[in-house]
Amino acid sequence: GAGVSQSPRYKVTKRGQDVALRCDPISGHVSLYWYRQALGQGPEFLTYFNYEAQQDKSGLPNDRFSAERPEGSISTLTIQRTEQRDSAMYRCASSLTASGINPGELFFGEGSRLTVL
Amino acid sequence: AQKITQTQPGMFVQEKEAVTLDCTYDTSDQSYGLFWYKQPSSGEMIFLIYQGSYDEQNATEGRYSLNFQKARKSANLVISASQLGDSAMYFCAMREGYNQGGKLIFGQGTELSVKP
């Protein structure tokens, strides 16, 4: 696609439910990143993939959060047993490459706004 | 300690004037990259400019320039000839290390308002 696409754009769920957020990166982009952004704050790194391999998951807050990118393209971020503190904008980004001093521009999607009631 | 510090929660500038947005960083790595992003009220994240730690020249992109002072660990963004469309949130970010790709650490942001 032309840009990074995320779905759903908005998700309202009840505490305790599981949610899955989807990211479709720019075609051909090797690296895919997940960030979380609370209102009025900067994005916070969660995890990233090169192709299908998860390279770094150090930013995932706890074991209720997981991500996968099984075929090296579309990725899913899953939050199990959601809690109110999980409410935030979840942003996906992709880049053509991950190696080197400058990986080039990081293209962000429009985000999925999650509200946990 | 904060890795990226943006001390100005909000800034005002008159249209057509220049403005400097402050950013200081903290890292012990020799190799790192510094980024600035713009986030308008629409919520999208727009890449503005990049500076590598080994770059000797300050980065420039059109009306944007990065005032990189390595010894002071500062990477201030300078916007020349401000326009009304520059009103947005601005984030400074850092990547530590050589092969960390787009794993960025963001600051808290500075909200810039351009007055007509």
Image: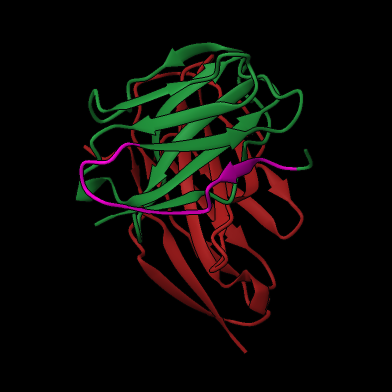
Chain colours: A green, B red
Task: Say if A111 sits above or below A104 in the image.
Answer: below
- In terms of image quadrants, where is residue B22? bottom left
Q: Residue furthest top?
A: A53
Task: Say if A65 sits above or below B85 in the image.
Answer: above
Q: How many marks?
A: 0
Q: Is residue B93 left or right of residue B55?
A: left
Q: Is residue A66 left or right of residue B46?
A: left
Residue A68 position, x and y percent, is: 48, 19
- In terms of image quadrants, where is residue A43? top left
Task: Say if A68 sits above or below A87 in the image.
Answer: above
Task: Say if A88 sits above or below B100 in the image.
Answer: below
Q: Quadrant of the C terminus of chain A?
A: bottom left
Magenta-span inclusion, residue B50 = no
Q: Quadrant of the N terminus of chain A?
A: top right
x 48%, y 49%: residue = A112
Residue A103 position, x and y percent, is: 64, 25
Residue A80 position, x and y percent, is: 28, 32
Q: Magenta stretch: give its range.
A: A3-18
Front residue of A65 and A20: A20
- In terms of image quadrants, where is residue B8? bottom left
Front residue of A29 and A84: A84
x 35%, y 59%: residue = A39
Q: Is residue B68 left or right of residue B15?
A: left
Magenta-span inclusion, residue A4 = yes
Residue B82 appears anywhere in the view: no
x 70%, y 24%: residue = A29
